[in-house]
Amino acid sequence: MADDRKTDGSRLLERAYELGAPDSHIAFYREFADSYDSTFAAGLGYIYPAGIVASLAAQDRPDGPILDIGCGTGLVAAAIRKADSGAVIDGVDISPEMLEKAREKGDYRDLLLADLTGDFSHLPTGYAALVSAGIFTFGHLGPERIAGILGLCRAGGVAALGVNASFYAEQGFEAVLERLQAEGRIDAVVLHEVPIYDGRDATHGSETALILEFTVT
């Protein structure tokens, strides 16, 4: 009976949390690309991108393009563009169908297909900022992937990477950040907790994220 009261957005989110191998991600997002914005974002009251924008604005970001990691349909880029109409943003995602939805919105300079759990050496480097909302969560990327994506950003660039708060604690992100800082790869690490949803959904409305702010050194 409890499951009967769940919204379509809740069910979609819970399926996403259970994803595993890259092929499962490709198939899942192929199925839901057309309805993702209406069922998930609108249905759950998705406000996570606003937290990413605020975090990015609070940092001393150098001039240059921004890379949106796991960009999906482009919700983060739309929020950045609203705050800074001149921002140059590229996006990367594993799903061709989600990238196509993002392309239709016109907020990206370039959209790139890549599996961030594998070889993504074809991606450009030298970005001034890395942003992400929704990719560091259950069923998606863990903290071990942060070290690899740092190479996409130039020295002095900044990051605003959102991590589901429960996932952060469970997967040991703190230890990874401490190691990267000890190795001299990142500096000025700050964490900000933000709501992911606006609270309208009874099942997941109270979930929060920790936005990892740091400078790439």
Image (cartoon, helix red, strand yellow):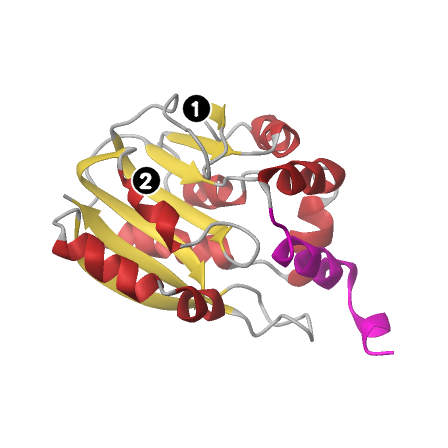
Three-letter code for the amino acid on which mark 1 is drawn: Arg
In percent of width and height, residue 130 lies at: 33, 41
Three-letter code for the amino acid on which mark 2 is drawn: Gly
Q: Check the picture and name the quadrant holding the N terminus.
A: bottom right
> Image quadrant of residue 147?
top left
Residue 70 lies, with reference to residue 214, above or below; the image says: above
In percent of width and height, residue 212 lies at: 32, 58
Residue 26 lies, with reference to residue 147, above or below; the image says: above
For residue 174, side relative to residue 92 (left or right): left
> Image quadrant of residue 170?
bottom left
Report which residue position mark 2 lands on. Answer: 148
Which one is in front, 167 or 41? 167
Q: Is residue 7 magenta?
A: yes
Residue 200 lies, with reference to residue 173, above or below; the image says: below
For residue 89, side relative to residue 96 (left or right): left
Q: Name the outermost residue toward the bottom.
A: 1
Rendered residue at 21%/57% (across/down) = 179
Q: How far apart are marks 1 and 2 (CA)?
A: 23 Å
Q: What's the magenta region?
A: 1-20
**Mark 1: which secondary structure?**
loop
**Mark 2: which secondary structure?**
helix
Residues at marks 1 and 2 touching, judged by CB atoms closer than 8 Å:
no
In percent of width and height, residue 12 lies at: 72, 55
Sequence-earlier tag: 1 or 2: 1
Q: Check the picture and name the quadrant holding the C terminus.
A: top left
For residue 10, side relative to residue 58 (left or right): right
Rendered residue at 61%/49% (across/down) = 20
Report which residue position mark 1 lands on. Answer: 109
Which one is in front, 31 or 102? 31
Can residue 217 be seen?
yes
Where residue 168 is drawn, which disc sits there?
Answer: none
